[in-house]
Amino acid sequence: MKTSQGKFAAYISYFFILLFCYAGYSKRLDFENFQVQIAQSPLLSAYAGFVSYAVIVAELLIIVLLLIPRSRIAGLYASLAIMTAFTIYIYLILNYSDFVPCSCGGILEKMGWTEHLIFNLACVVIAGAGILLLQGTVSLRRRLTMILLSVMVSSGIVTLLFLRSEYIIKRQNNFTRRFLLHPVLEDRSVPLDDEQYYFAGSDQLHIYLGNKHYPQTLVTLDYNLAGIKKLKMAPSDFKYTFRNLQVQVKGAYYYLYDGTVPVIYRGKLGDAVPRTISYRDAYFTQLVVMDSVHFALRTQSKADKMFTIASLDLTKPPKVKLYPGILEKQVDGVFDSDGKLISGGHSDTLVYAYTYRNTFLIINNKFELKRKLHTIDTTTVAKIRTGSQSNGTHKLIAPPLKVNQNISANRKLAFIQSDLMGKHESVKSWKNAKVIDIYRTDKQEYIGSFYIYNQGKSKLTDFIVTDQYLFAIVGDQLVRYTYRKPITEYFKPGEAENLSTE
């Protein structure tokens, strides 16, 4: 009887030796890919570096323990613990994670998550049986107690890692991206007649495009990317020399402006002749239309020449009011404060994303700084070098480190196009796509990331998010993407506003 028990225990040991040899070899053979996949796990992202090495070392150590008869019982306990950990990991993935990721190689590559959960549970039972057979001289109560203790400890460690990783990734991220599983899907595209288009705005039914080459042209399309209409804008008082004429749509009107010339035109959609509504009120570098008579500006202060957020109210004097406390100077107050000012969409806020540091600001419609939030990269101070030229101009004297390339916001989410590669990311993917990171705007929380892939050699140049779709301009293609979880959960009217805030 003892001989039979010993043989069965040995067979179980050989099974785990083969299992861990195969698993360890598979991971080691393509270690870089294994580490990248661990980094994309919704449970272990923050510990990808440590876990990727620890799992392989643990599997090799278990193999050694199982090969030596005197240490075989320790190897079986270790096998029980690690298979329990793998089981709890998959259970948490299936029931408590934000998304279910792709497989992680090895045996998991050949099975679905549910099948692998069943396989792991079977391995836990087999390991427990091996312990009971090999420790025949030890009391049954003690053996069961040790088995239960091993299961509880390994389960507790995985659960603790999960909870801690979630906190780190969402609140204290160390620049480890979590790529969501197809949060947007391309479902439609149309060709454009050149690559110089940008988004001028959207409403519940239409999107609007401006063109850098033909700045007096406004293009309207419906959400199905059909019904294209072009409007040739011809202002009634068009006598100025513009450097960078732009168009923006808000509500029933479009607005034509430059900023280097202190004039703003407003026209009703469909009317080709916009009228001057602001003249000599303000010079500005950026403008956001809040309503037909209220605007948010980024301008330069006359006193110190630094970038400053300002309001423009056409209904009462003084029309322009500066808010110098919003943008923070780090080096020169100009290049270090550079960024993009946008509307927060349905949330009735303004969002300003710095270009050269990992910060974006949430500003309410009273021009009060409500939140100072951070992206997941670690560039807290703008890495720029500036100098004064002989003619008195202030210029960059070395290429800066660009952090944030572009931003669009809607309801409680900000979509930020990043220019920096995070930890454990694929160089190949970065060459073939642009990355978009998603953040909450009502509190410090990172949601996840996704790629917008190139169209041939053409890359993403602009994008806009609405309740129903994400629209992107990639080269001369206008592409529509539909949302999937978890994005859809934030864009359901009436529900997104009720999400918890901190």
Image (cartoon, rainbow, N blue to C red):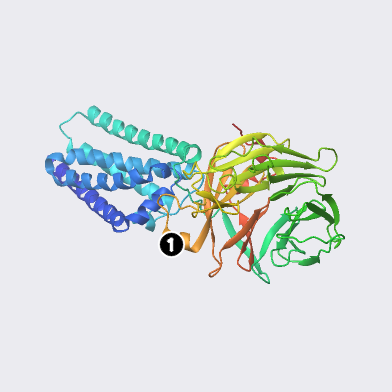
Task: Residue at 80% x, 51% y: name it.
Answer: 251
Say which of 252 and 500 sits in front: 252
Say which of 115 and 283 sits in front: 283
Q: Position of residue 282 (x, y in %)?
A: 76, 46
In the displayed structure image, the side of residue 150 where residue 41 appears, left or right: right
Question: Looking at the figure, which quarter contains the N terminus?
Answer: top left
* Residue 349 seen: no
The residue type indicated by label 1 comes to: Lys
Task: Residue at 64% x, 40% y: name it.
Answer: 304
Question: Looking at the figure, which quarter contains the C terminus?
Answer: top right
Farthest-out residue, bottom = 193
In the displayed structure image, the side of residue 342 where residue 169 appears, left or right: left
Q: Position of residue 158 (x, y in %)?
A: 37, 38
Q: Which residue is mark 1?
A: 428
Say which of 53 and 20 sits in front: 53
Say which of 130 and 158 sits in front: 158
Task: Residue at 77% x, 43% y: name it.
Answer: 312
